[in-house]
Image (cartoon, coloured by chain):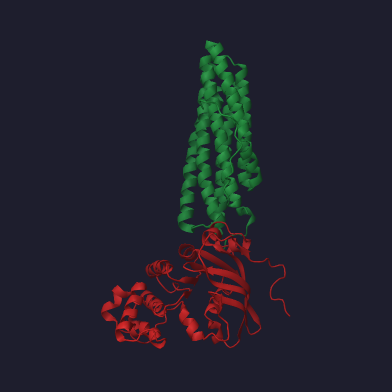
């Protein structure tokens, strides 16, 4: 029962505002997702310019969050939405908070590109990149699920978050081993670890968005415990 | 036989009850015809005691007709024909041996427009207990009048002018006077047909507060056009549409996650 599948409100402006809200959140999602993919690309291509551009985009994401929140407050105060309309507003409010964090984390990844460029690439750069592609695909799919109102797609991502956790755990072990064996690996290794941790968190935010999409569409919380892989002691 | 409704009309959706409250009013397949017109069709629901049940739906949906079945107000309309069963504590309301006057003391009613008798404030409240023989002495009657006005939240405002005309009060005060009048005869069920639609927001808030307090002692059924009011005051909500009970369940469920598309469309303001 997505808003787009329903009859319009008697007060047309209300329907238009809800549709605009969903479109705004989707646009913010697109921008946050582009920050993640471009940060990864900047790391892979050792592209400092692209990394700087990603960092610049974070301010845009923050501004979008503020604008969307204002619209939601206005909708709540003036329209007093209930049932599914209320869920549209609450879902938007929660998703923009996750997307804002995704933007911050992508910016943090981009910030490390310059430091990484100071040392030679290792096989582990590739592993981080592969993990990044998994996370980016999860984010992409939950945002698609949000835009199309498909709860099942959101749930599919929600169930796969342990893929990300496994990637992270494997990377964590490999990076610790590499740093122990080769002192020159410590600095790039530390940065790669942070990047991996940031990616893991972006994955968590994608999972949050999946839960919100499920709630938005069905009105039910996703309460069952998600399958979880073992976690490293220090995470 | 004519079909008044499309045959593919889906059955009533009932939410699982989250309340453990005892059932006060139970209806089964209640239908009402005005002349040839079917105004209410096969309404089956159980209304809990010590709770507020809101009946919502667009104009002409049958919600007021349903309310009027509970204390046999439809008897007063010549062309009205009521069928089905309505039980209060398992006693059939439509039974031949049920005196509608006695029934209406058990089931009080408050209307959209306050309708005090053209008598004093005191007499408005004292009238019911007197004709039902609830007080033997003047002191007993005084006591009933006072406690009823206190329960209706009006005592403080009228204690010093009990012998002024009831109609001299403001609209909100008159509505509370009418509630005091209903309370005075010890009802078990109180029906309210849009009790606040003629009142300003402050008088409305007072009545809503009163409804919330009355929940401790009575089973209340309220018909309202205000979604927000239904959401604020009721624990159970019944949604009527085209003479049918579409959906019935805990208010929170109806307003956050309705099961039927028609309920959803109505409460979110999408009905044409």
Residue at (72%, 79%) from the top-left corner? B2
Closest to the observer, A216 or B27: B27
Q: Is residue B180 visible?
A: yes
Chain letter, colour green: A
In terms of image quadrants, where is residue B86? bottom right
Q: Where residue A9 sits: x, y (%)?
A: 57, 60
Q: Where residue B11 sits: x, y (%)?
A: 67, 66
Closest to the observer, B89 or B198: B89
Q: Where residue B242 sits: x, y (%)?
A: 62, 72
In terms of image quadrants, where is residue A180? top right
- Residue B215 position (above or below residue B70): above
Chain letter, colour red: B
- Residue B57 position (above or below residue A65): below
- Residue B117 position (above or below residue A138): below
Number of numbered markers = 0
Q: Where residue B24 sits: x, y (%)?
A: 52, 71
Is A168 on the left or on the right of A62, as rendered? right
């Amino acid at each position: 029962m997505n808003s787009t599948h329903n009859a319009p409100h008697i007060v047309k402006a209300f329907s238009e505002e809800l549709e605009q809200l969903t479109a705004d959140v989707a646009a913010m999602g697109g921008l946050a997702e582009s920050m993640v993919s471009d940060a990864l690309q900047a790391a892979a291509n050792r592209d400092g310019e692209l990394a700087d551009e990603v960092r610049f985009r974070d301010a845009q994401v923050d501004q979008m969050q503020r604008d969307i929140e204002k619209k939601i407050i206005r909708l709540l105060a003036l329209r007093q939405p209930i049932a599914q309309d209320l869920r549209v507003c609450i879902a938007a409010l929660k998703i923009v908070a996750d997307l804002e964090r995704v933007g911050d984390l992508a910016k943090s990844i981009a910030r490390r590109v310059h430091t990484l460029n100071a040392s030679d690439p290792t096989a582990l750069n590739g592993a981080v990149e592969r993990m990044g592609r998994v996370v980016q695909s999860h984010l992409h799919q939950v945002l698609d699920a949000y835009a199309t109102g498909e709860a099942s797609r959101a749930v599919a991502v929600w169930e796969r978050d342990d893929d990300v956790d496994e990637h992270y755990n494997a990377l964590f072990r490999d990076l610790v081993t590499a740093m122990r064996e080769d002192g020159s690996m410590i600095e790039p290794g530390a940065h790669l670890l942070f990047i991996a941790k940031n990616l893991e968190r972006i994955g968590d935010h994608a999972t949050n968005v999946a839960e919100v999409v499920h709630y938005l569409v069905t009105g039910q919380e996703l309460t069952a415990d998600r399958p979880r892989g073992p976690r490293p002691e220090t995470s | 036989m004519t079909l008044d409704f499309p045959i593919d009309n889906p059955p009533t959706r009932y939410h699982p009850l989250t309340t453990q409250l005892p059932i006060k009013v139970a209806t089964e397949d209640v239908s009402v015809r005005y002349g040839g017109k079917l105004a209410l069709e096969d309404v089956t629901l159980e209304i809990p005691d010590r709770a507020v049940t809101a009946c919502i739906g667009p104009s002409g949906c049958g919600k007021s007709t349903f309310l009027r079945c509970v204390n046999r107000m439809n008897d007063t309309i010549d062309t009205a024909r009521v069928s089905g069963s309505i039980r209060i504590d398992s006693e059939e309301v439509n039974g031949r041996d049920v005196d509608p006057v006695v029934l209406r003391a058990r089931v009080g009613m408050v209307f959209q427009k306050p309708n005090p008798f053209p008598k004093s404030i005191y007499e408005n409240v004292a009238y019911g207990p007197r004709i039902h023989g609830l007080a033997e002495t003047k002191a007993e009657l005084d006591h009933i009048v006072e406690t009823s006005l206190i329960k209706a939240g009006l005592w403080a405002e009228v204690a010093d002018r009990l012998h002024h005309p009831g109609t001299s009060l403001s609209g909100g005060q008159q509505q509370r006077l009418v509630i005091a009048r209903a309370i005075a005869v010890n009802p078990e069920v109180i029906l309210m047909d849009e009790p606040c639609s003629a009142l300003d927001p402050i008088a409305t808030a007072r009545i809503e507060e009163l409804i919330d307090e009355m929940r401790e002692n009575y089973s209340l059924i309220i018909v309202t056009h205000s979604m927000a009011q239904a959401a604020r005051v009721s624990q159970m909500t019944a949604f009527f549409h085209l003479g049918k009970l579409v959906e019935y369940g805990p208010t929170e469920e109806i307003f956050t996650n309705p099961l039927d598309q028609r309920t959803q469309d109505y409460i979110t303001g999408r009905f044409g």
